[in-house]
Amino acid sequence: MECFPNAAFIVNKTPILRLNPDLDPEVFAQIYAEHGLVQVYDIFEPETADVIFEVLAKSTPWRLVYSDENGKHVLMSNADLQAAGRERMDRVARQLHSQAKNKFAYIYSSYPMLDAYLKGWDPGHPLHTIFEFLNSEEYLNFVRAITGEKDVIKVDAQATLYSPGNFLTNHDDTGDDHERRAAYTLGFTKGWRADWGGNLVFYDEEKPNQVLRTLLPGWNVLSIFRVPRPHSVTYVTPFAGAGRYSITGWLRDDPAAGSSS
C-alpha cells in the first residue's frame, strides 16, 4: 500500500456551486418512486464539475480507511502510513482479504468531509465549500423533491478515492438510529472501464447472490438510492488505469447540531 503524495491547496479557483439549471427534479422523482434508485447526469455545469474533479484529484489530503478484524473503522493519515511501514500494511491487506470472505470489510481512501468541517481541519479547503453547498437549501430541496423525503434536514459527506486493491463488501447502509433516508454518490470519474472493477452493485434482498443492477463509475453524475438496500463496490483491479473519485454519503433526518456519522 502506497502512501499518498502530500496534498497542497493548488486549486485556486473557487467553484461556482450551483446545480445544472436545466434539470427538472420531477422527472427523476418519477423514476425514484418506481425503482428506489435514480441517476441524474450532468448534475453540475461542465466548468463546475471540472473544478470539483481538480480538487479531488490534486488537492485532497486523503486518509486510508479500512475495517479491522473487530469491525472497527480505522483512519490513517499519510504520516500514519509511513510510520506503519510496508510489512504492517501488507498484513492489513491479508487480514482484509480473509475478513471479506464472510464478513463486512472495506478499504479505500477517504476525506471525511463532515468531520473535517465540524472539527476545523484544513481551513479554507475547497471541500468545505462543497460540503456547505450540499447542505444548502438549493441542494436539499432538489434531493427532497427527487426522493419525496420532506424531512431530510442535512447531507453528510465524504470524498472517496478507490485505487487498485480497494473494495467495499455487501452492506445495506442502515444507520444506527435509522436516520438515513437515502444514500447518494456524486461521481467525478473519467474514462472508467467496466473491467477495472470499482462498480456499484445492487443485490436482491432475498437472494443475496443475485445482482439486480450495476452502476459503473461515471462523470458528473448523481446517483440516489433508498436505504436500506444491499450493495457493494467491487474490487478494483491491479490494472485499473485511473482513480475512482466520488463524494458519497446519506440524506438524513436526525438533528443537525453537533452530530456526526
Image: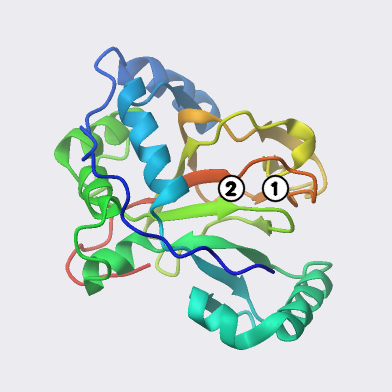
Please give the name of the residue rendered at 47% of the width and 46% of the height, measured from the top-left corner: 57
Residue on which disc 1 sits: 205
- x, y (%) of residue 155? 30, 51
**79 or 103, nearer to the observer:** 79
Residue 188: percent from left, percent from top:
48, 36
Residue 254: image quadrant is bottom left
| Residue type pointed to by label 1 | Glu
Identify the image quadrant of residue 138.
Answer: top left
Residue 73 at x, y percent in the picture: 54, 77
Give the image's coloring scheme: rainbow
Rounded to the nearest whole Å, what is the CA distance between mark 2 and mark 1? 7 Å
Q: Is residue 83 above or below residue 95?
A: below
- Badge 2 crowding class, 10 Å Cα cut-off, few under 14, some 14 to 19, many 20 or more, is many
Asked whether 151 or 129 is in front, the reply is 129
Specify whether residue 147 is in view: no
- Identify the residue under disc 2: 229
